[in-house]
Image (tube, grey):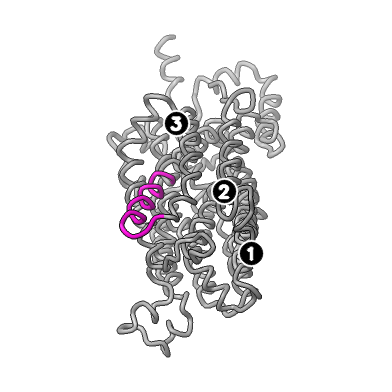
C-alpha cells in the first residue's frame, strides 16, 4: 500500500505539452541556468532600448519639427511623444497577457520584438510631430511582451532561481533604459558629430535621428530570429493549465467524484480576470509598482531635458554625446551592482526592505540635483556620474522587489493575465510620466525668479513627493504579501 501511494505521488508529464517538457528538464537541471538568463536578458533589453533611446535627442527633434513656438515649450511637446508609447501599451497589455495565457508566451514575445524592428525604424524616419506620435503609439500597442516575459522568467527556472530570473528582468530593463539613451546620445545627429564619416547630404544627414533607431532595430531583428528557438513554458494539456499533475491528487479526485465539477468551476473562476482584481496582494503590489514607475519615467525624461537645456534655465548645456556618456557609466555601475551586491542585500533584509531603503535614499539624492548644476568642469562630471549611477541602482532595487511580489501573488495559469494588468496600469502611469514631466519642466523654466522653489528645484521637489508616496505605500496595511 505504501509503495502504491509513493508511486502515485510522482509527477505525471504529458507527452505533447511544452510546459511539461520544460518542467521535466528542470527536474534534471543542476547549476546556474546561464542560457536561460542570457535569453531573458536579451529579450527584455530589446524591448527596453527603444522606450528611452529618444530622450537625449527628443529636445532637438521637437525643435527641428518647428512645432514649438518658444524654446520653453519644447519640453511640453516632447512629453507627448514620450507618452504615446506608454499609452499604446496601456491599451493592449491585458490583451497580450490573455493571449500569452491562451496560446503561449513565445508567440507574444516574437510579436513584441518584431514590432521593435518595424516601428522603431519608422520612428527614426519621422519627418513631423504627428508621424513621431503615430509610430511610437503603434510600437507600444504591439510591444506587449514585458508581462509575458516576467511570467516566463518564473516558469523556465527552478524555484531556487526564480528570484534571479526576475532580477534579470528588472536589471535588463533598467540597463536598457540607460543604454537606450546612451545610444541615442552617441548616434543621433551623426553628420554633426562625425562629419568625416557621415556627410550632411547623406541619408543620415537628412534623417539625423535614424542611426540610433536603426542600431536598436538591427539588434531586435537578431533577437527576434533567436526567439524561434525559445522553449514554450505554458502547459497545454486538457487536465489542467497550472503545472504537471500529481497522481495522488488524481486519486483523491476519483474518490470524490461528486466534487469534481465544483473544483473545475472554482478553477475556472480563479482563472478569470475578475478574480485577479479581488487579489489584494497582487493589486497592492501593482499599485506600488505603478507609483515608482511613474517616478522613474518622469525622472528619465526630466534628466535628459535638464542635462541638454541651457544653463540660463538651470540646465547643464550638455550635448547629446555627453548625456550618452553619463548614462553609459550608469549602466555599467548598475550591471555590477545588480549581479554582485543586490542578491546579497536581498538575502539579508528581504526585497521589501531593500525597496524602502532605496526609496528613502533617493529623496535627498534628487534634492541635490539643482545644486549639482552649479558645479562645473571635472567636479560636475564626477558628481553627476556618481549621482546618476546611485539613482539608477536605487530605482532597479525597487522595481525588482515589486516584480517578485507580483509573481508570487498568483499561480502560473494567471501570471500572463496578472502581468498584463500590471503592464496596463504601469503603462497608464508611465504615459503620464513623460507628459507630466515635460509640462512640469517647461512650467518650471518659466518661474526662475519665484520665491518658493524656483526653476528646477520645483521639478525635483515634485519628483520627491511621488517617491515619498511610493515609500509610504510599501508599508502595511496597504501592501500585503500573499500567504504561501
Helix, strand or loop at label 1? It is helix
Position of 273 with respect to 324 (left or right) is right
Which mark's residue is nearer the viewer, 1 or 2? Answer: 1
**What separation in Å lies between label 1 and label 2 (alpha carbons)?**
36 Å
Q: In which quarter of the view is residue 200 placed?
A: bottom left
Q: Which residue is tagged 1?
A: 76
Q: In which quarter of the view is residue 46 placed?
A: bottom left
The spot of residue 94 in percent (x, y) is 64, 48
Q: Which residue is tagged 3?
A: 354
**What separation in Å lies between label 3 and label 2 (alpha carbons)?**
31 Å
Helix, strand or loop at label 2? It is helix
Q: What secondary structure do most residues of the magenta stretch adopt? A: helix
In this view, 423 is above or below 482: below
Identify the mark nearer the N-term, 3 or 1: 1
**What separation in Å lies between label 3 and label 1 (alpha carbons)?**
35 Å
In this view, 9 is above or below 91: above
Instruction: Give, as a single range, the part of the protein colored magenta.
Output: 375-391
The spot of residue 66 in percent (x, y) is 61, 79
Identify the mark nearer the N-term, 3 or 2: 2
Helix, strand or loop at label 3? It is helix
Asked whether the beta carbons under mark 3 and mark 2 sit within 8 Å of each other, the answer is no
Q: Which residue is tagged 2?
A: 100
Q: Which residue is drawn at 52% across and 65% down?
A: 312
Judge the density around disc 1: few (<14), some (14-19), many (≥20) Cα neighbours within 10 Å: many
Given residues 346 and 475, the one toward you in this image is 475
Identify the mark nearer the N-term, 1 or 2: 1
Which mark's residue is nearer the viewer, 3 or 2? Answer: 3
The spot of residue 116 in percent (x, y) is 50, 64
Asked whether 377 falls inside the magenta stretch, the response is yes
Q: Residue at x 39, y 80 (%)?
A: 192
Can residue 6 be seen by looking at this rendering? yes
Judge the density around disc 2: few (<14), some (14-19), many (≥20) Cα neighbours within 10 Å: many
Amino acid at each position: 500500500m505504501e509503495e502504491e501511494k509513493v508511486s502515485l505521488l510522482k509527477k505525471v508529464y504529458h507527452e505533447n505539452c511544452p510546459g511539461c517538457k520544460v518542467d521535466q528538464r528542470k527536474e534534471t537541471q543542476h547549476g546556474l541556468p546561464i542560457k536561460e538568463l542570457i535569453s531573458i536578458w536579451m529579450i527584455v533589453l530589446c524591448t527596453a532600448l527603444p522606450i528611452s533611446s529618444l530622450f537625449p535627442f527628443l529636445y532637438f527633434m521637437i525643435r527641428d519639427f518647428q512645432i514649438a513656438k518658444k524654446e520653453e515649450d519644447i519640453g511640453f511637446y516632447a512629453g507627448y511623444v514620450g507618452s504615446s508609447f506608454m499609452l499604446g501599451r496601456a491599451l493592449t497589455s491585458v490583451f497580450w497577457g490573455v493571449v500569452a495565457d491562451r496560446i503561449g508566451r513565445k508567440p507574444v514575445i516574437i510579436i513584441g520584438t518584431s514590432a521593435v524592428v518595424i516601428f522603431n525604424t519608422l520612428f527614426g524616419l519621422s519627418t513631423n510631430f504627428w508621424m513621431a506620435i503615430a509610430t511610437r503609439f503603434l510600437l507600444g500597442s504591439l510591444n506587449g511582451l514585458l508581462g509575458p516575459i516576467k511570467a516566463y522568467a518564473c516558469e523556465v527556472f527552478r524555484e531556487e532561481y526564480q528570484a534571479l530570473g526576475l532580477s534579470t528582468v528588472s536589471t535588463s530593463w533598467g540597463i536598457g533604459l540607460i543604454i537606450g539613451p546612451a545610444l541615442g546620445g552617441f548616434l543621433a545627429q551623426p553628420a554633426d558629430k562625425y562629419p568625416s564619416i557621415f556627410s550632411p547630404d547623406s541619408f543620415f544627414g537628412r534623417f539625423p535621428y535614424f542611426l540610433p533607431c536603426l542600431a536598436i532595430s538591427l539588434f531586435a531583428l537578431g533577437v527576434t530570429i533567436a526567439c524561434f528557438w525559445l522553449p514554450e513554458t505554458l502547459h497545454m494539456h486538457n487536465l489542467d493549465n497550472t503545472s504537471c499533475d500529481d497522481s495522488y491528487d488524481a486519486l483523491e479526485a476519483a474518490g470524490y467524484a461528486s466534487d469534481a465539477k465544483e473544483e473545475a468551476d472554482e478553477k475556472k473562476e480563479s482563472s478569470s480576470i475578475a478574480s485577479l482584481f479581488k487579489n489584494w496582494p497582487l493589486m497592492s503590489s501593482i499599485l506600488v509598482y505603478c507609483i515608482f514607475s511613474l517616478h522613474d519615467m518622469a525622472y528619465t525624461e526630466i534628466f535628459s531635458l535638464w542635462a541638454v537645456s541651457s544653463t540660463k534655465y538651470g540646465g547643464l548645456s550638455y550635448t547629446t554625446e555627453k548625456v550618452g556618456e553619463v548614462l553609459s557609466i550608469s549602466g555599467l555601475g548598475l550591471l555590477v551592482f545588480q549581479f554582485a551586491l543586490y542578491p546579497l542585500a536581498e538575502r539579508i533584509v528581504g526585497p521589501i526592505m531593500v525597496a524602502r531603503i532605496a526609496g528613502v535614499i533617493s529623496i535627498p539624492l534628487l534634492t541635490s540635483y539643482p545644486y549639482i548644476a552649479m558645479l562645473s568642469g571635472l567636479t560636475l562630471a564626477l558628481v553627476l556620474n556618481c549621482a546618476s549611477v546611485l539613482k539608477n541602482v536605487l530605482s532597479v532595487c525597487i522595481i525588482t522587489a515589486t516584480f517578485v511580489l507580483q509573481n508570487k501573488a498568483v499561480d502560473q495559469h494567471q501570471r500572463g493575465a496578472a502581468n498584463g494588468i500590471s503592464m496596463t496600469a504601469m503603462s497608464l502611469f508611465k504615459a503620464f510620466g513623460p507628459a507630466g514631466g515635460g509640462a512640469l519642466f517647461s512650467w518650471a523654466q518659466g518661474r526662475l525668479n519665484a520665491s518658493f522653489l524656483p526653476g528646477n528645484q520645483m521639478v525635483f521637489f515634485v519628483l520627491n513627493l511621488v517617491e515619498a508616496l511610493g515609500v509610504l505605500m510599501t508599508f502595511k496595511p496597504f501592501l500585503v504579501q500573499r500567504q504561501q
